[in-house]
Amino acid sequence: MSALSRQCAATSRAGAGASRKQLLSKGPGACSTVQTRSYAAVQKKAASKQGPNGFKGGRNQESQKKYKVDPNARIMQYKPLPAAQLASPLFQTVNPDPLAALPTFRADTLTRSQASRALAFADAAQDASAPFRVFGVQRRMVLEFRLLSRACSVVRGVTLDVVDRLDKAGQEGSKGNRLVLTGDEGCGKSFALLQATQYAAGRDWLVLYIPRGIDLVNSSTPYVYDARTQTYLQGAFALETLKRFARANAAKLNDLVTSTPVELEPRAVLLAGLQPQGQSTNPAASEGTVLPPGTPITQLIEIGTREASVAPAVLDSLLEQLGQQTKRPVLLAVDDFQAVYGKSAYKDPHFAQIRPWHLSMPRLILEYASGNKTFARGAVLGALSSSPHYPLPLELAESLNTPSHAPSSGPYVQRHATAQFYASGLETIPVPSKLSIPEAAALFSVRWKGGKEPGDEMFFSRYVESGGNARSFVWKGILGGAL
């Protein structure tokens, strides 16, 4: 080995531990060393295992095997025994169910003699197409019905007043029968509306019941802008409405047909199979097609339930055809009625608020509520609710001559002309703010769940504490005192 090679090897060993060192040799065979910096490399340590109690370390391996969960193991579930296996006297209740002996709510027996009496709605096995079972009810009603062994309600005087108006509207058009149930918070407007829908269904009416009108404007369903109608279509809600309407009125729609031609959109034509998809370039397919008069109503509903994009137009055409026929009256019942007149939570692409009349479902309701569209036989019935997020609008309150709880009101507050137009011509049916003594007694006997038998003193104390208000009497007086 030459002297130059020995010098390079020596300097390499000497510079391995230096932080910065460079050796330059003079002469033609200069040599330099390269710093490796192996001291700066991250030292990898063996990962310690996690113990069963959260401490590091691989100790206590036996306990790990002991608590190891078998993924194929079957998880035990506790399920109630069938009623057939509860024949022992130990499982028999001492106190019989008082709701089992309640008479059934029937339209043909709902007369003045039934006032202040508790009536139970038919079970699902007896009447699966009841409006409240198909369309649903208010969320508070759902909880109340779950607390009872049977869904029931008390027939009040206002219920019979609404029934009398429906009997009158069954022979007239909806132009003069656009009714709104008004009253204080918790006075029973939603229950009166539910009883009216049950009565109409029992009288062979076609019922379209929307129990939660707030869901139309609270931005809970998808929407898309339609340039043809200049509205935002709520296809998913319209599709579900068509399905439930067909279920609730299945036996009454079989003999109904269209009276005028129904124009379908191109997409609906393809879904219905009226125009082959291979002929999409045909001008007839681009312009749609027309269902001739005499087409079964059930066929029109079937077309609308195939896809959400065509459901709003089909629902509009369906109500128009039902409004022209005179074989059966039609009831359009809407709870949370004030929500379709106020503000909505929907936003346009510029993040500006969309008014309810620019949404397809509220717009359809407003057209019939204002009388712009009518039923030849039928009525429009709404019920106000006390929602902090969707209060009673000023325009609707002035039309109904009802006190408004709007934060700003007066002659200098701007009114929306469109809201005033849709609110004109509505008639109010006031619901009493207090239960009568017989009505409260019937309600008390049905809903009392206390451990001891209630007496007159207990009843009157609960009635006075609630001020006679139906909701307070049930939730604070009866259920609150029984817990």
Image (spheres, rainbow, N blue to C red):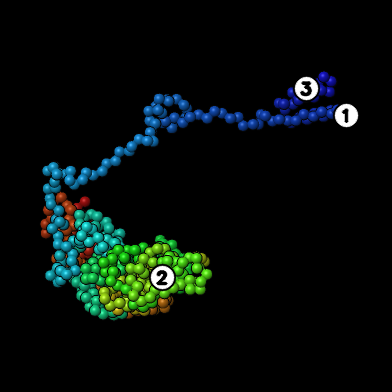
Coordinates of residue 350 in the picture (x, y in percent): 52, 66
Residue bearing the label numbered 1 = 28
- Asked which quadrant contains residue 101, the reply is bottom left
204 sits to left or right of 57: left
In front: label 1 or label 2: 2
169 sits to left or right of 242: left
Q: Residue at x 17, y 52 (%)?
A: 450
Coordinates of residue 10 in the picture (x, y in percent): 78, 22
- Is residue 30 positioned above or below 238 on the image? above
Q: Earlier in the sequence, mark 1 or mark 3?
A: 3
Which label sits on residue 10?
A: 3
- Is residue 17 positioned above or below 377 on the image? above
Coordinates of residue 380 in the picture (x, y in percent): 30, 74
Q: Earlier in the sequence, mark 1 or mark 2?
A: 1
Residue bearing the label numbered 2 = 313
Report the residue that reaches farthest toward the top: 1
Coordinates of residue 56 in the picture (x, y in percent): 47, 29
Could you tell me the amino acid type at mark 2? Ala
Q: Residue at x 72, y 26 (%)?
A: 16
Report the residue that reaches farthest toward the right: 28
Q: Look at the image and tell me whether residue 318 can be seen.
A: yes
- Is residue 417 positioned above or below 237 on the image? below
11 sits to left or right of 233: right
